[in-house]
Image: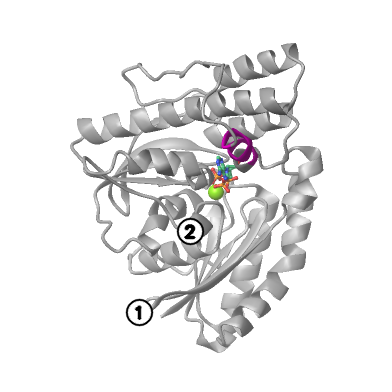
Amino acid sequence: MIVLGIESSCDETGLALFDSKDGMIGHIVNSQHDIHSKYGGVVPELASRDHVLKLVPLLDQLLSQNKILLENINLIAFTNGPGLLGPLLTGASFAKSLAWSLKIKAIEVDHLEAHIFSPMITEKELKLPFISLLVSGGHTILTLVKDNSNYKVLGKTLDDSAGEVFDKVARHLGLAYPGGPEISKVASNISSSSYIFPRPMIKTDCYNFSFSGLKTHVTQLINKVELNDSIIEDIAYDFENSIIDVLISKTLRAAREYNIKNIVITGGVSANKKLRMRCDAEKGKNKIFFPNIAYSTDNGAMIAYMGWLKSSEKSANNTLEINPNPSSRFI
Ligand SMILES: Nc1ncnc2c1ncn2[C@@H]1O[C@H](COP(=O)(O)OP(=O)(O)OP(=O)(O)O)[C@@H](O)[C@H]1O
Ligand SMILES: [Mg+2]
Protein backbone atom coordinates (compact mmCIF):
# COMPACT_ATOMS: atom_id res chain seq x y z
CA MET A 1 0.00 0.00 0.00
CA ILE A 2 1.31 3.48 -0.88
CA VAL A 3 0.22 6.28 1.47
CA LEU A 4 0.49 9.97 0.61
CA GLY A 5 0.94 12.07 3.78
CA ILE A 6 0.04 15.75 3.85
CA GLU A 7 1.06 18.13 6.65
CA SER A 8 -0.07 21.77 6.76
CA SER A 9 -0.89 22.52 10.41
CA CYS A 10 1.40 25.51 10.80
CA ASP A 11 4.26 26.92 8.70
CA GLU A 12 5.61 23.83 6.94
CA THR A 13 4.06 22.28 3.85
CA GLY A 14 5.12 18.65 4.07
CA LEU A 15 4.33 15.78 1.71
CA ALA A 16 5.56 12.20 1.79
CA LEU A 17 5.04 8.82 0.17
CA PHE A 18 5.18 5.78 2.45
CA ASP A 19 5.17 2.20 1.19
CA SER A 20 3.86 -0.28 3.78
CA LYS A 21 6.33 -2.91 2.45
CA ASP A 22 9.48 -0.89 1.78
CA GLY A 23 9.16 2.07 4.17
CA MET A 24 9.47 5.76 3.37
CA ILE A 25 9.77 6.32 -0.39
CA GLY A 26 10.46 10.03 -0.16
CA HIS A 27 9.39 13.25 1.52
CA ILE A 28 9.53 16.94 0.81
CA VAL A 29 9.10 19.95 3.11
CA ASN A 30 8.75 23.60 2.28
CA SER A 31 9.38 25.77 5.30
CA GLN A 32 7.87 29.25 5.46
CA HIS A 33 10.46 30.58 7.93
CA ASP A 34 11.56 33.35 5.56
CA ILE A 35 7.98 34.61 5.27
CA HIS A 36 7.35 34.74 9.04
CA SER A 37 10.78 35.57 10.45
CA LYS A 38 10.35 39.34 10.20
CA TYR A 39 7.19 39.10 12.35
CA GLY A 40 8.88 36.96 15.03
CA GLY A 41 6.16 34.32 14.78
CA VAL A 42 3.73 32.67 12.38
CA VAL A 43 1.12 34.89 10.67
CA PRO A 44 -1.80 32.47 10.04
CA GLU A 45 -3.18 34.16 6.91
CA LEU A 46 0.26 34.26 5.24
CA ALA A 47 0.79 30.61 6.21
CA SER A 48 -2.51 29.55 4.59
CA ARG A 49 -1.76 31.46 1.40
CA ASP A 50 1.66 29.87 1.06
CA HIS A 51 0.29 26.33 1.60
CA VAL A 52 -2.23 26.98 -1.19
CA LEU A 53 0.59 28.05 -3.51
CA LYS A 54 2.90 25.14 -2.66
CA LEU A 55 0.73 22.02 -2.29
CA VAL A 56 0.28 21.18 -5.99
CA PRO A 57 3.86 21.90 -7.17
CA LEU A 58 5.32 20.02 -4.19
CA LEU A 59 3.17 16.98 -4.93
CA ASP A 60 4.27 17.07 -8.58
CA GLN A 61 7.91 17.28 -7.50
CA LEU A 62 7.57 14.44 -4.96
CA LEU A 63 5.87 12.15 -7.48
CA SER A 64 8.34 12.82 -10.28
CA GLN A 65 11.44 12.57 -8.03
CA ASN A 66 10.29 9.15 -6.85
CA LYS A 67 8.83 7.98 -10.18
CA ILE A 68 5.40 7.37 -8.65
CA LEU A 69 2.14 8.10 -10.48
CA LEU A 70 -0.92 9.59 -8.82
CA GLU A 71 -2.73 6.35 -9.71
CA ASN A 72 -0.22 4.36 -7.60
CA ILE A 73 -1.39 6.06 -4.38
CA ASN A 74 -3.77 3.87 -2.32
CA LEU A 75 -4.50 6.08 0.69
CA ILE A 76 -4.18 9.75 1.62
CA ALA A 77 -3.43 10.77 5.23
CA PHE A 78 -3.74 14.41 6.22
CA THR A 79 -3.21 16.43 9.41
CA ASN A 80 -6.63 17.27 10.78
CA GLY A 81 -5.44 19.05 13.95
CA PRO A 82 -4.24 20.48 16.19
CA GLY A 83 -2.94 23.56 14.43
CA LEU A 84 -4.00 26.82 12.83
CA LEU A 85 -7.43 26.49 11.24
CA GLY A 86 -6.62 28.21 7.93
CA PRO A 87 -3.47 26.17 7.24
CA LEU A 88 -5.25 22.95 8.32
CA LEU A 89 -8.11 23.70 5.90
CA THR A 90 -5.75 24.07 2.95
CA GLY A 91 -4.21 20.61 3.48
CA ALA A 92 -7.48 18.91 4.39
CA SER A 93 -9.33 20.33 1.36
CA PHE A 94 -6.47 19.34 -0.93
CA ALA A 95 -6.28 15.82 0.55
CA LYS A 96 -10.02 15.22 0.42
CA SER A 97 -10.47 16.49 -3.15
CA LEU A 98 -7.53 14.42 -4.37
CA ALA A 99 -8.87 11.32 -2.61
CA TRP A 100 -12.33 11.91 -4.06
CA SER A 101 -10.98 12.32 -7.59
CA LEU A 102 -8.77 9.21 -7.29
CA LYS A 103 -11.63 7.26 -5.63
CA ILE A 104 -9.45 6.32 -2.65
CA LYS A 105 -9.78 6.79 1.09
CA ALA A 106 -8.69 9.96 2.92
CA ILE A 107 -7.88 9.45 6.57
CA GLU A 108 -7.38 12.08 9.27
CA VAL A 109 -4.26 12.08 11.43
CA ASP A 110 -3.67 13.88 14.72
CA HIS A 111 -0.47 15.92 14.39
CA LEU A 112 0.65 15.15 17.97
CA GLU A 113 0.16 11.41 17.59
CA ALA A 114 2.17 11.60 14.37
CA HIS A 115 5.06 13.30 16.23
CA ILE A 116 4.90 10.71 19.02
CA PHE A 117 5.19 7.73 16.66
CA SER A 118 7.73 9.36 14.29
CA PRO A 119 10.79 7.48 15.68
CA MET A 120 9.17 4.20 14.56
CA ILE A 121 9.65 5.22 10.92
CA THR A 122 13.35 4.46 11.24
CA GLU A 123 13.82 2.69 14.61
CA LYS A 124 12.70 -0.86 13.94
CA GLU A 125 13.57 -2.10 17.44
CA LEU A 126 11.32 0.46 19.16
CA LYS A 127 8.39 -1.38 20.72
CA LEU A 128 5.44 -0.34 22.86
CA PRO A 129 4.93 0.56 25.65
CA PHE A 130 7.07 3.68 25.91
CA ILE A 131 7.32 6.98 27.75
CA SER A 132 6.87 9.81 25.28
CA LEU A 133 8.19 13.33 25.68
CA LEU A 134 6.66 15.48 22.95
CA VAL A 135 8.47 18.79 22.98
CA SER A 136 7.54 21.11 20.16
CA GLY A 137 6.53 24.65 19.24
CA GLY A 138 3.02 24.26 20.66
CA HIS A 139 3.33 21.49 23.24
CA THR A 140 5.39 19.92 26.00
CA ILE A 141 3.66 16.70 27.04
CA LEU A 142 4.88 13.64 28.90
CA THR A 143 2.78 10.57 28.15
CA LEU A 144 2.75 6.87 28.89
CA VAL A 145 1.93 5.27 25.53
CA LYS A 146 0.60 1.75 26.01
CA ASP A 147 -0.47 1.21 22.40
CA ASN A 148 -1.37 3.40 19.46
CA SER A 149 -4.73 4.38 20.89
CA ASN A 150 -4.10 4.07 24.62
CA TYR A 151 -2.33 7.06 26.17
CA LYS A 152 -2.03 8.24 29.75
CA VAL A 153 -0.95 11.87 29.93
CA LEU A 154 1.41 12.17 32.91
CA GLY A 155 2.08 15.87 32.68
CA LYS A 156 2.25 18.87 30.40
CA THR A 157 3.33 22.46 30.44
CA LEU A 158 1.22 24.72 32.60
CA ASP A 159 2.08 27.72 30.42
CA ASP A 160 4.52 28.07 27.49
CA SER A 161 5.90 25.10 25.58
CA ALA A 162 9.67 24.60 25.53
CA GLY A 163 9.85 25.45 21.81
CA GLU A 164 7.87 28.65 22.30
CA VAL A 165 10.26 29.77 25.04
CA PHE A 166 13.26 29.03 22.81
CA ASP A 167 11.62 31.21 20.14
CA LYS A 168 10.74 34.08 22.51
CA VAL A 169 14.12 34.24 24.27
CA ALA A 170 15.88 34.09 20.88
CA ARG A 171 13.83 37.06 19.74
CA HIS A 172 14.90 39.07 22.81
CA LEU A 173 18.50 38.12 22.08
CA GLY A 174 18.11 39.47 18.53
CA LEU A 175 18.40 35.99 16.98
CA ALA A 176 16.38 34.75 14.01
CA TYR A 177 13.17 32.69 14.01
CA PRO A 178 12.80 29.81 14.76
CA GLY A 179 14.83 30.42 17.89
CA GLY A 180 15.64 26.86 18.98
CA PRO A 181 18.33 26.14 16.38
CA GLU A 182 19.73 29.69 16.70
CA ILE A 183 20.12 29.48 20.48
CA SER A 184 21.69 26.07 20.08
CA LYS A 185 24.15 27.39 17.50
CA VAL A 186 25.43 30.29 19.60
CA ALA A 187 25.48 28.17 22.79
CA SER A 188 27.70 25.61 21.08
CA ASN A 189 30.50 28.23 20.75
CA ILE A 190 31.29 27.93 24.48
CA SER A 191 31.62 25.17 27.07
CA SER A 192 30.56 26.93 30.27
CA SER A 193 28.57 29.99 31.27
CA SER A 194 28.78 32.60 34.00
CA TYR A 195 24.99 32.42 34.43
CA ILE A 196 23.05 29.82 36.36
CA PHE A 197 19.34 30.09 35.59
CA PRO A 198 16.51 28.35 37.50
CA ARG A 199 15.49 24.79 36.53
CA PRO A 200 11.71 25.28 36.84
CA MET A 201 9.72 22.54 38.61
CA ILE A 202 12.63 20.11 38.38
CA LYS A 203 12.09 18.94 41.95
CA THR A 204 8.27 18.90 42.07
CA ASP A 205 6.60 15.50 42.43
CA CYS A 206 4.30 15.97 39.44
CA TYR A 207 5.21 15.62 35.77
CA ASN A 208 4.03 19.07 34.75
CA PHE A 209 6.37 21.69 33.33
CA SER A 210 6.44 25.48 33.48
CA PHE A 211 8.73 27.56 31.31
CA SER A 212 7.24 31.06 31.36
CA GLY A 213 9.02 31.99 34.62
CA LEU A 214 12.34 31.02 33.07
CA LYS A 215 11.47 33.11 30.02
CA THR A 216 10.66 36.14 32.21
CA HIS A 217 13.82 35.64 34.29
CA VAL A 218 16.00 35.53 31.17
CA THR A 219 14.27 38.39 29.36
CA GLN A 220 14.54 40.63 32.45
CA LEU A 221 18.27 39.93 32.49
CA ILE A 222 18.50 40.68 28.75
CA ASN A 223 16.79 44.03 29.33
CA LYS A 224 19.36 44.93 32.00
CA VAL A 225 22.61 44.05 30.20
CA GLU A 226 24.21 45.51 27.10
CA LEU A 227 24.14 42.60 24.68
CA ASN A 228 27.23 41.57 22.75
CA ASP A 229 28.22 38.25 21.14
CA SER A 230 29.88 36.93 24.26
CA ILE A 231 26.94 37.75 26.58
CA ILE A 232 24.50 36.27 24.05
CA GLU A 233 26.50 33.02 24.06
CA ASP A 234 26.65 33.02 27.87
CA ILE A 235 22.88 33.48 28.21
CA ALA A 236 22.04 31.00 25.43
CA TYR A 237 24.31 28.35 26.99
CA ASP A 238 22.70 28.13 30.42
CA PHE A 239 19.19 28.81 29.09
CA GLU A 240 19.49 25.80 26.77
CA ASN A 241 20.95 23.69 29.61
CA SER A 242 18.13 24.67 31.95
CA ILE A 243 15.45 23.45 29.55
CA ILE A 244 17.36 20.25 28.77
CA ASP A 245 17.95 19.50 32.49
CA VAL A 246 14.24 19.79 33.27
CA LEU A 247 13.10 17.76 30.24
CA ILE A 248 15.54 14.91 30.87
CA SER A 249 15.04 14.77 34.62
CA LYS A 250 11.23 14.48 34.43
CA THR A 251 11.30 12.01 31.55
CA LEU A 252 13.77 9.66 33.27
CA ARG A 253 11.80 9.86 36.51
CA ALA A 254 8.61 8.85 34.68
CA ALA A 255 10.41 5.91 33.07
CA ARG A 256 11.64 4.79 36.52
CA GLU A 257 8.29 5.23 38.24
CA TYR A 258 6.31 3.37 35.56
CA ASN A 259 9.09 0.83 35.06
CA ILE A 260 9.25 1.45 31.30
CA LYS A 261 12.57 1.00 29.51
CA ASN A 262 11.78 2.65 26.18
CA ILE A 263 11.62 6.44 25.91
CA VAL A 264 10.83 8.47 22.80
CA ILE A 265 11.56 12.18 22.48
CA THR A 266 9.87 13.92 19.56
CA GLY A 267 8.74 17.29 18.17
CA GLY A 268 10.83 20.22 16.94
CA VAL A 269 12.94 20.56 20.11
CA SER A 270 13.99 16.91 19.73
CA ALA A 271 16.23 18.16 16.89
CA ASN A 272 18.39 19.82 19.58
CA LYS A 273 21.91 18.37 19.40
CA LYS A 274 22.77 18.85 23.06
CA LEU A 275 19.52 17.17 24.14
CA ARG A 276 20.41 14.19 21.92
CA MET A 277 23.98 14.06 23.28
CA ARG A 278 22.83 14.23 26.89
CA CYS A 279 20.35 11.41 26.23
CA ASP A 280 23.12 9.32 24.68
CA ALA A 281 24.85 9.41 28.05
CA GLU A 282 21.69 7.96 29.67
CA LYS A 283 21.49 4.99 27.32
CA GLY A 284 22.11 1.67 29.04
CA LYS A 285 19.62 2.19 31.83
CA ASN A 286 17.02 3.23 29.26
CA LYS A 287 16.63 3.01 25.51
CA ILE A 288 16.02 6.52 24.25
CA PHE A 289 14.74 6.94 20.70
CA PHE A 290 14.60 10.11 18.60
CA PRO A 291 13.11 10.59 15.16
CA ASN A 292 15.45 11.05 12.23
CA ILE A 293 16.35 14.80 12.47
CA ALA A 294 14.35 15.46 9.28
CA TYR A 295 11.25 14.09 11.04
CA SER A 296 11.67 16.13 14.27
CA THR A 297 10.11 19.34 13.01
CA ASP A 298 6.88 19.25 11.01
CA ASN A 299 6.89 16.95 7.99
CA GLY A 300 4.62 14.81 5.83
CA ALA A 301 6.52 11.57 6.54
CA MET A 302 5.17 11.25 10.07
CA ILE A 303 1.64 11.91 8.78
CA ALA A 304 1.92 9.22 6.07
CA TYR A 305 3.33 6.73 8.61
CA MET A 306 0.65 7.47 11.23
CA GLY A 307 -2.04 7.26 8.53
CA TRP A 308 -0.80 3.80 7.67
CA LEU A 309 -0.78 2.74 11.37
CA LYS A 310 -4.35 4.05 11.75
CA SER A 311 -5.63 2.60 8.49
CA SER A 312 -6.02 -0.88 9.97
CA GLU A 313 -8.25 0.38 12.80
CA LYS A 314 -12.01 -0.10 12.55
CA SER A 315 -12.59 3.59 13.29
CA ALA A 316 -10.49 4.59 10.27
CA ASN A 317 -13.44 5.54 8.12
CA ASN A 318 -13.20 7.59 5.00
CA THR A 319 -13.13 11.13 6.40
CA LEU A 320 -14.33 13.16 3.40
CA GLU A 321 -17.02 14.71 5.62
CA ILE A 322 -14.72 15.54 8.55
CA ASN A 323 -13.51 19.10 8.92
CA PRO A 324 -10.24 20.12 10.59
CA ASN A 325 -10.22 20.62 14.33
CA PRO A 326 -7.68 23.17 15.64
CA SER A 327 -7.59 21.40 19.04
CA SER A 328 -6.15 18.00 19.72
CA ARG A 329 -8.49 15.05 20.02
CA PHE A 330 -6.50 13.09 22.49
CA ILE A 331 -4.84 15.53 24.85
N1 LIG B 1 17.70 22.45 17.37
C1 LIG B 1 16.66 22.89 18.08
N2 LIG B 1 16.79 23.16 19.40
C2 LIG B 1 15.75 23.62 20.12
N3 LIG B 1 14.52 23.86 19.59
C3 LIG B 1 14.35 23.61 18.29
C4 LIG B 1 15.40 23.10 17.46
N4 LIG B 1 14.92 22.97 16.19
C5 LIG B 1 13.62 23.37 16.23
N5 LIG B 1 13.29 23.76 17.49
C6 LIG B 1 12.01 24.31 17.94
O1 LIG B 1 10.97 23.45 17.54
C7 LIG B 1 9.77 24.21 17.40
C8 LIG B 1 9.03 23.77 16.15
O2 LIG B 1 8.67 22.44 16.35
P1 LIG B 1 7.42 21.81 15.59
O3 LIG B 1 7.59 22.09 14.14
O4 LIG B 1 7.26 20.40 15.99
O5 LIG B 1 6.31 22.70 16.28
P2 LIG B 1 4.84 23.00 15.88
O6 LIG B 1 4.40 22.03 14.86
O7 LIG B 1 4.74 24.45 15.59
O8 LIG B 1 4.08 22.69 17.23
P3 LIG B 1 3.15 21.42 17.55
O9 LIG B 1 3.81 20.22 16.96
O10 LIG B 1 3.13 21.40 19.04
O11 LIG B 1 1.84 21.73 16.94
C9 LIG B 1 10.18 25.67 17.37
O12 LIG B 1 9.77 26.25 18.60
C10 LIG B 1 11.69 25.63 17.25
O13 LIG B 1 12.36 26.70 17.88
MG1 LIG C 1 4.68 19.96 15.12
- Name the amino acid, label 1: Lys
291 versus 69 height, above or below = above
Residue 273 in the image: above or below residue 126: above
Q: What residue sits right under mark 1 in the picture? A: 21
Q: Quadrant of residue 97?
A: bottom right
Viewer-proximal residue, 43 or 35?
Answer: 35
Could you say where residue 120 lies in the image, as x and y percent from the top left?
A: 36, 60
The answer to which of 48 and 39 lies nearer the viewer is: 39
Quarter of the picture holding the N terminus: bottom left
The magenta stretch is: 182-188
Hey, which quadrant is residue 182 in on the image? top right
Residue depicted at x 72% and y 29%? 229
Q: Secondary structure at mark 1?
A: loop
- Asked whether 230 or 135 is in front, the reply is 230
Q: Which residue is mark 2?
A: 109
Q: Amino acid at mark 2?
A: Val
Res. 65 in view: yes
From the top left corner, tell me how far across and down residue 107 is, in percent.
48, 66
Quadrant for the C terminus, please.
Answer: top left
Q: x, y (%) of residue 324?
A: 59, 54
Quarter of the picture for ligand 1? top right
